[in-house]
Amino acid sequence: MKVIGAMQTAGGDWRVEVVRHASGSRWYRLIHHDNIVDFLTIGRVAELLGQAGVDMGDLAEVGRAG
């Protein structure tokens, strides 16, 4: 697995990573402090962020991770 992109809130409390597997499949990872949720679609990421009161527009692209 390799992180191929990431975005996060200004304070870094919420981070979304785009992950690619060697097979070519991709998914999203949502990170909030010590909590990590893997294998998400972008729709599910938006839903979870929305439930937490975070708008997708509040995320900014960050340098590559991993």
Image (spheres, rainbow, N blue to C red):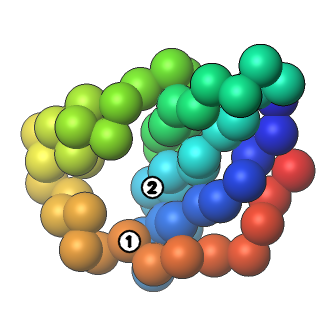
Residue 61 coordinates in the image, percent (x, y) = 54, 76
As displayed, is residue 32 above or below residue 35? below
Q: Is residue 59 left or right of residue 26?
A: left
Q: Is tag 1's residue or tag 2's residue first in the polypeptide sequence?
A: 2
Tag 2's secondary structure?
A: strand
Determine if residue 17 is in view. yes
As displayed, is residue 23 above or below residue 54? above
Category of crowding for the residue at label 2, using alpha-carbon neighbours closer than 10 angstroms: few (below 14), some (14–19), many (at least 20): some
As displayed, is residue 7 above or below residue 10? above
For the N terminus, the image quarter is top right
Q: Is residue 40 left or right of residue 16?
A: left
Q: Which residue is rendered at x = 59% and y = 49% of the image?
A: 17
Determine if residue 33 is in view. no
Q: Which residue is mark 2?
A: 14
Q: Going by the picture, which residue comes out furthest to the front?
A: 24
Q: Is residue 26 left or right of residue 58?
A: right
Q: Are marks 1 and 2 in contact (CB under 8 Å)?
A: yes
Between 62 and 53, the one nearer to me in the picture: 62
Q: Amino acid at mark 1?
A: Leu
Q: Nearer the viewer, mark 1 or mark 2?
A: 1
Q: Which residue is mark 1?
A: 59
